[in-house]
Amino acid sequence: MLSRVSKTLFPKLPLCCILRFARAMSSQSAQRAFQLRVNPITGNSEWVVIEEDEPEEQTFNGGSQNSLLATTSYLDMLNDSHRNRAFREAIDKTISTPCHVLDIGSGTGLLSMMAARAMGSMTCRMVTACESYLPMVKLMKKVVRLNGMENQIKLINKRSDELKRGIDITSPAQVLVSEILDSELLGEGLIPSLQHAHDMLLVENPETVPYKATTYGQLVESTFLWKLHDLHGNEAKASDGILLVPTGLDNILGVKPQQYAFHCDAIGKEVKLLSEPFKIFEFDFWKRPDSHGETEVHVKSTNDGRVHAVISWWILQLDREGTIFYSTAPRWISLPGNTSHGDWCDHWKQCVWFVPGEGMSITKDEEVCLHAVHTDISISYNLKNQASRNEIMQYGFKNGDFKLILPPERIAIYGDSEWRHTMFSAISNSLQGRVDPLCIVADDSIFLTLLVAHLSKTSHVMSFFPGLQDKGFQYLQAVANSNGFSMDRVEFLNKRKTKLTMHDTHQKKVDLLIGEPFYYGMDGMLPWQNLRFWNERTMLDPVLSQDALILPCKAILKACALSVPDLWNSRCCLSKIEGFDHSIVNSTLGACGELPAEQECPCLPYFIWQCGNVKKLSEAFTVMEFDCSKPITSSCGKTQVEFTEPGICHGFALWIDWVMDSENSLVVSTGPEKRYWKQGVKLLAEPVAVRTNESRSTGECRSAVIQALFDPSSGDLNVRHAFS
């Protein structure tokens, strides 16, 4: 329930950073917000208090790099010129007479200002904007003031379903403008918001922008997508003897049955299309939607193959007449109303629904029945093979059955033979010659816990599972017999590591401290924030034996110079958007380009391989190393980078290589070549033309110096660069 509320309240904010948000009133009636943030290095939570009248730099704890809004997709959305133009054209076309306009989820106020401008100097005009997130409310006030429209727009810091007619708004609105859409369409609370608006805030038969939305799907075969969810099918290829998904317990571990936002263009060459696009649901904004809907779509296959996934997208019709559209379809799609694609953007992607297990085998011209269901916040599918009507491809397990849910990338990692071989070798080597070893698994790795218990029949394993908690222990209990060990040798320590004593370890020193590292629920964090393992190794120092082995024994911060024009353009500084000045938001939203000399762009997490057009301009290089065998400390590094390819450098990708043995022979890299981890991206304030040493071009840089400083108290990595 918490994630649903968080996603509805804060549609542009990452769920891993927002755990709870509340609004309160002080004695002076000024609004105050409370946001819970997690320190990624310590795992501790802290409340951040945001005052309505507090200066911006205090609100965000020291400027743009730590801004609460810099990690959101607001900037990316505002840089989507195709979206902005479509909304402006539809609003200008729809609002032709004086009226009351309601803007739900107003953000920076762009749609509200468009509506106010469309009415010009008409009398009896009114624009009411509601925005629930206080930091964005503060920013919108600045934008509206900068554009001289503060007297034309009434801004209310509430959720739309908290608005009351006669109190917050004096009369029902004739026009609704809103953009409360996510990649799935419904995940930001579109249906509940529309229901309340039609019940309480709008006239009967109102005008709306957008007018309606239609979701589409396509059946595809993709080995890559299959590996993201079918651990049982992929684990069979491993030779380590570990059974994460034992036979008969096929559903014990898997992904959540939901649609996953994904840049499908990035795997376009790895996808085999098995059907033409088909329409699934249609949602009319101009009338009250239902919370529940079902439909069956009969899809004729166009190829022989195996259906691994349903890829879906949506198309907005923004005007009543059907002349203005916006599409999130992949680039291989050509549909009526989808005549042009905007530039690469990250705020809206396609969605992927995984077909369970190894998928459904189909032959050309065979008919497949897709059963689609929508709730008020999501869409789900079941597939039925018409040739065998009893074969229903759906997620399901009996009530009461335990199932551990992990992210798709984690499922793929656990099924990766190379990764498993590295871990197997590292743990096997570390256990050599140790009798009755005491091992602590400091992170959320179920694989390492099973591996130690499986390899050493005399070991005692303590697992902390800081994110999984007792779910991790329940899982171990379910698979212990299949992996040949008894649970009396495995222990779950449900307490803070800082309080661990010899009493907790049964008066025995720890021989082996290990991690992948992996922390459940922290998938959106920057790579070096998994150095939490190093901090926890430090907290455990009093119970470690003198010859204790720490794995990973070392972490290496690696980097690579990149040309990423699509990503840079999506994060570049804003000036005027459809005629409205937005330059005041750049620092707060963490923009790059045209910034004051003292300001730096923030490091943000991305799957580099999904960032549109990407070109490596240098080999991977080492920035600094972290020695996990010693207590955590602040660290710094400096290195010179020689460019190996000419081009335009937009920034640097940064990641961690985890060294699992003292000989540096067993290394797990989380770099761009590996598609299961996010990298940190440090964009430049301005792109730089670079050349190689062999190039004869002038006026271009041949090298750069990179400096980095790691702060263990916060997990921040300060990265600086200089080109020459």
Image (cartoon, rainbow, N blue to C red):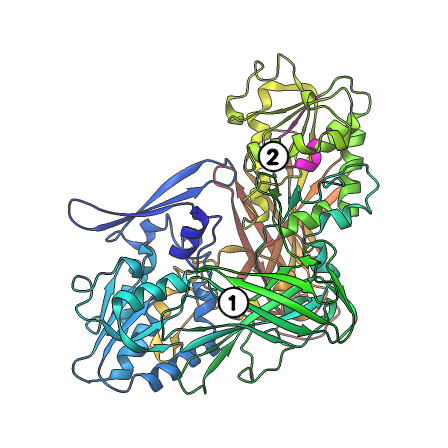
Q: Earlier in the sequence, mark 2 or mark 1?
A: 1
For badge 1, the amino acid type reads Trp
In the picture, the disc for residue 472 is 2
Q: Which residues are magenta?
A: 438-449
* Residue 459 in the image: above or below residue 698: above
Indicate the secondary structure of the residue bearing disc 2: helix
Q: Position of residue 199 (x, y in %)?
A: 28, 66
* Residue 4 in the image: above or below residue 202: above
Q: Is residue 126 magenta?
A: no
Q: Position of residue 429 (x, y in %)?
A: 81, 30
Residue at 25 percent across and 83 percent down: it is: 119
Whole-angstrom CA distance, mark 2 to mark 1, is: 33 Å
Indicate the secondary structure of the residue bearing disc 1: loop
Q: Is residue 552 visible?
A: yes
Write down the residue under mark 1: 348
Residue at 20 percent across and 51 percent down: it is: 30
Would residue 563 appear left or right of 211 to someone viewing this image?
right
Q: Is residue 614 visible?
A: no
Q: Position of residue 636 (x, y in %)?
A: 57, 43
Q: Is residue 447 magenta?
A: yes
Residue placed most toward the observer, 414 or 695: 414
